[in-house]
Amino acid sequence: MTPSADTARVVMSTGNHCVVETDQGDLRRCQLPSRRHARPVCGDRVQWDDTDGTPTVRRVLERDNVIERGDFRGHPRPLAANIHRMVLVMAPAPTPDTLLADRYHVLAAAIEVPLTVWINKADFGEGLATPAVQRLLCEHCPGDTRSLAGSATTGEGIDDLEALIQGETIILVGQSGVGKSSLTQRLIPSLDLRINTLSALSGQGRHTTTTTRLFSRNRQFAVIDSPGVRTLRLDHLDIADVNRGFPEIAAAARGCRFRDCHHGTEPGCAVRSGLKAGTIHAQRFDNWRQLMREAGGFQ
Ligand SMILES: Nc1nc2c(ncn2[C@@H]2O[C@H](COP(=O)(O)OP(=O)(O)OP(=O)(O)O)[C@@H](O)[C@H]2O)c(=O)[nH]1
Ligand SMILES: [Mg+2]
Ligand SMILES: [Zn+2]
């Protein structure tokens, strides 16, 4: 380690540089380490120095975990590292994509990170009592998934979210337009200033979320705002990972008469009983089947 080497956290990483937040809270644009080393991603802790006049990341420190999603060929690509919680943002509008939501349940379960659903835009219509918000709350927060509802616009419910994420680094994920950046803005009071500094350092505009970025609120918590996606490839995950994302189905399946039950027309199927009884939601079951097919479970 060189005498001036220091640790910092990556708040943004592009192909050829990254921006780090130093332990003193300053943002610095850094060159990346040589190709021999791991490429830093948002949330990484790194060693950096500017001994040769250019701030440079020398080394990515060991990761607690890393969120990976498939690229266009299905190869896993790291998105963010050192996450304590995934917050799936959904809203009455745009229309919720439940398959995408369930892909996030699988992704979070695969790296053993808790997933919390935040139902945003509760200020629509009559607020939380609207059928749309109620439906989201009961249909898309399966099992013991923690769910909260509120509004990034009015600030309703934000205290509960803040209390939940104390000491954590969370990543906000979900469809485009559900309000991830608005929520980040609510959670990080000095965000405007930070975004302006980041834009200046990276040369990017400030209105559309195109890059995953981390914002920290003093020493309380950190929020990673990610760009909305239309789909999420999980080719690198297997059947066991899919099942971990559907704990209510996996639990019911233990009661099926046949161990290899596909929960189709087999007799004594506890999953189909659960569907009839309403303890398993039909949409979740359809999504489970789809993801099992993708993972090679049903040929
Ligand atoms: N009524 C209402 N509108 C909201 C709320 N949160 C966000 N919006 C609006 O929804 C639109 C999208 O918000 P963004 O925060 O940009 O959404 P995003 O999830 O970051 O979108 P991407 O960056 O494209 O992934 C904006 O017009 C916001 O003003 C909310 O709580 N209530
Ligand atoms: Mg955004
Ligand atoms: Zn069955």
Image (cartoon, rainbow, N blue to C red):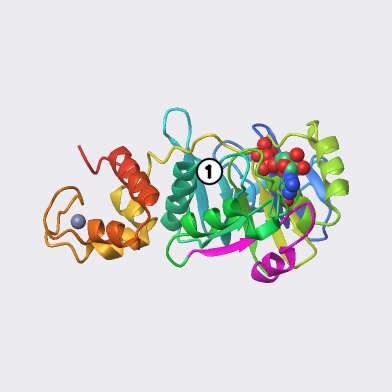
Residue 148 highlighted magenta (yes or no): yes
Is residue 148 something that shows in the picture? yes
The quadrant of the rendering that contains the N terminus is: bottom right
The quadrant of the rendering that contains the C terminus is: top left
Give the tally of numbered discs. 1
Residue type at tag 1: Pro
Q: Is residue 116 left or right of residue 162?
A: left
Q: Which residues are magenta?
A: 145-166
Q: Quadrant of residue 165?
A: bottom right
Q: Nearer the viewer, residue 205 or 129?
A: 129
Residue at image mark 1: 78
Q: Is residue 87 left or right of residue 205?
A: left
Residue 255 drawn above or below residue 101: below
Q: Quadrant of residue 25?
A: bottom right
Q: Residue at point 33% right, 50% down?
A: 285
Q: Nearer the viewer, residue 79 or 85?
A: 85
Q: Residue at point 79% right, 56% down?
A: 154
Q: Residue at point 47% right, 28% down?
A: 72
**Callout 1: SS:** strand
Residue 281 drawn above or below residue 298: below
Residue 77 % position (x, y): 50, 39
Residue 117 % position (x, y): 56, 57
Q: Quadrant of ligand 3?
A: bottom left
Residue 145 % position (x, y): 49, 64
Is residue 81 something that shows in the picture? no
